[in-house]
Amino acid sequence: MDRLIKHVNLWVVILIAVLVGQSLVLAIVVDRLDALWTQVNEPEPGREMTFETSQMIHNAVSGIYTRPSVDAPTNRLYFPDLRIYLPYNEQSKQIVYDYMPAYNKVPGEVTLNSNTTVNIVPLSFSDISCMQGMVDVSINKAQGNPQATVKLADGRTLYMKTHPAKEDVAHCNDVWGDLGPTQMMDLFKQARSY
């Protein structure tokens, strides 16, 4: 009986030690998440972000987008998820996209961005809005107020609007270089179905 009590006491001590260890780990994780949340959602104006935060944002954004396929003999840039292509040139080769297929009554959507923008490492919180999608494209059903439409030969219609808020555009022009939302939308107006 004494031996059983010693084993039970040992297991109780081990269990308490494990629980205390998990509590400490949880407290550290919660504290780190709280600090990160505060840094991302309540930045001081002009405050630069930490290297860790910058890398996490870069990795998250760059992992979202897909590169279209290039067909060199036809000089076309194919978007297989959308069954469309664009002429392949210096600007169009920078396009990357994120495709969400239609579901129930929600139309299919595409967010367009440039490879250059997706691959920047943000230096400040004001850079984040520049890394988000430049052009939103909905298929067969307009979302909000489209700025342009493209009627495809297969009967589908693409509705396009630029994504960044107007107040972010002045800052983002430096980040975007020669392919901003307006130029990207102009490129996508050349879309053809296949």
Image (tube, helix red, strand yellow):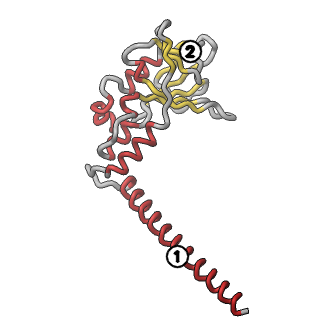
Which quarter of the rendering shows the C terminus? top right
> Residue at 48% of width from left, 67% of height from top?
25
Query: How many marks overall?
Result: 2
**98 relative to 51 in the view: left or right:** right
- Please tell me whether mark 1 or mark 2 is closer to you in this view: 1
> Residue at 36% of width from left, 36% of height from top?
130
Q: Secondary structure at mark 1?
A: helix
In the image, residue 12 above or below residue 69: below
Quadrant in the picture for residue 182: top left
Which is more toward the observer, 55 or 95?
Answer: 55
Q: Which residue is under mark 2? A: 151
Say few, some or many: other residues with alpha carbon within 10 Å of mark 2 (under 14 / 14 to 19 / 20 or more).
Answer: some
Lower sequence index among marks 1 and 2 = 1
> Residue at 49% of width from left, 6% of height from top?
73
Q: Position of residue 94 (x, y in %)?
A: 40, 23
Q: Position of residue 64 (x, y in %)?
A: 49, 36
Tag shown at residue 20? 1
Which is more toward the observer, 143 or 87?
Answer: 87
